């Protein structure tokens, strides 16, 4: 069975500092990987996704993530965060080739302080 | 593109009543729609998957007679919470997958249900 682990429930960081949000997954088959962001009382917005090809994926708002198959990781990074990046971030996985059935991690609350 | 709307955004109802939540794909046809619920400070849990014109597939532990899902067209799915109770209070989020973009779900803004 697939599972997703987000090791950090909360990540506080100062504005303009770099940040990495960690995500590890387990699966016996090839997977698609996603990062979503959720602002308070809103739905989820897709930040980026890995389907195949280059292991470094660039997304919106300056975020990027790197797929590491050997470490079964898909960590999210941003070199310089803004106050507006304060939100909940969810990593998700689905089996490659299938439609839907996303398995979500528990989320990481990113708090950017001035 | 790929915008999904939900209506209402918030609803408060009395215990024992039924509530209908609509999920619409505004600029694309969604062959599959998904319904999730999210408890405070927790992740999303898939409730059911619905394909246009067929019965929904419910996840284990989700009562299909309590959470009625209808996916009558390629742009509309509805979730009806029947005989709602306070423990049904939650944030309900739908998502939709396009015909061609089968790998990605696009999420609605969510509906906050409060049952008194």
Image: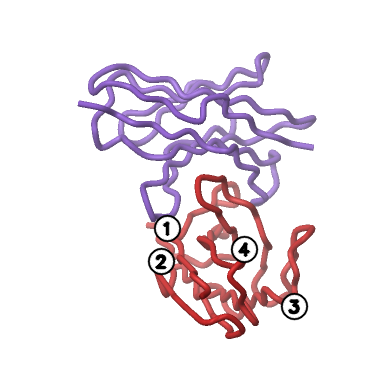
Chain colours: A purple, B red
Q: Where's residue A32, x and y in %?
A: 62, 36
Q: Secondary structure at mark 3?
A: loop
Q: Comparing marks 3 and 4, which lies closer to the viewer?
A: 3
The answer as to whether the residues below labels 2 and 4 share one chain is: yes
Q: Secondary structure at mark 4?
A: strand
Residue most toward the bottom? B17
Above or below, A16 against A89 in this view is above
B105 or A16: nearer the viewer: A16
- The residue indicated by pointer 2 is B27
Q: Are marks 1 and 2 in contact (CB under 8 Å)?
A: yes
The answer as to whether the residues below labels 3 and 4 share one chain is: yes
Q: Secondary structure at mark 2?
A: loop
B59 or A52: nearer the viewer: B59
Which of the two discs, 1 and 2, labels the residue nearer the N terminus? Answer: 1
Q: Where's residue A85, x and y in %?
A: 30, 35
Q: Comparing marks 3 and 2, which lies closer to the viewer?
A: 3
Q: Circle 3 marks a residue in which chain?
A: B
- The residue indicated by pointer 4 is B32
Above or below, B109 against B81 in this view is above
Residue at image coords 57%, 76%: B78
Crowd around label 2: few <14 · some 14–19 · many ≥20 (10 Å): few
Residue at image coords 41%, 28%: A58
Q: Quadrant of residue A16?
A: top left
Which of the two discs, 2 and 4, labels the residue nearer the N terminus? Answer: 2
- The residue indicated by pointer 3 is B65
**Distance of label 2 from label 4 (alpha carbons):** 15 Å
Which of the two discs, 1 and 4, labels the residue nearer the N terminus? Answer: 1
Q: Where's residue B112, x and y in %?
A: 45, 65
Q: Circle 2 marks a residue in which chain?
A: B
- The residue indicated by pointer 1 is B2
């Amino acid at each position: 069975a697939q599972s997703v682990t987000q090791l950090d429930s909360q990540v506080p960081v100062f504005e303009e500092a770099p940040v990495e949000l960690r995500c590890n997954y387990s699966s016996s088959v090839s997977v698609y990987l996603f990062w979503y962001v959720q602002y308070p009382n809103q739905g989820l917005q897709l930040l980026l996704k890995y389907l195949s090809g280059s292991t470094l994926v660039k997304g919106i708002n300056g975020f990027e993530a790197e797929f590491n198959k050997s470490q079964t990781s898909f960590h999210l990074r941003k070199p310089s965060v803004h106050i507006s990046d304060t939100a909940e971030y969810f990593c998700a996985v689905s089996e490659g080739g299938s439609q839907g059935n996303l398995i979500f991690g528990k989320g990481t609350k990113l708090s950017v302080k001035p | 593109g790929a915008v999904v709307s939900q209506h209402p955004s918030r609803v408060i109802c009395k215990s024992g009543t039924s509530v209908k939540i609509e999920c619409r794909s505004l600029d694309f046809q969604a062959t599959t729609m998904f319904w999730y619920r999210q408890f405070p400070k927790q992740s999303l849990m898939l409730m059911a998957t619905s394909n246009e014109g067929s019965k929904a597939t419910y996840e284990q532990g989700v009562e299909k007679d309590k959470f009625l899902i209808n996916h009558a067209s390629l742009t509309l799915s509805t979730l009806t919470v029947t005989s709602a109770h306070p423990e049904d209070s939650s944030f309900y989020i739908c998502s939709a997958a396009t015909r061609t973009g089968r790998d990605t779900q696009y999420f609605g803004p969510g509906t906050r249900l409060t049952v008194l």
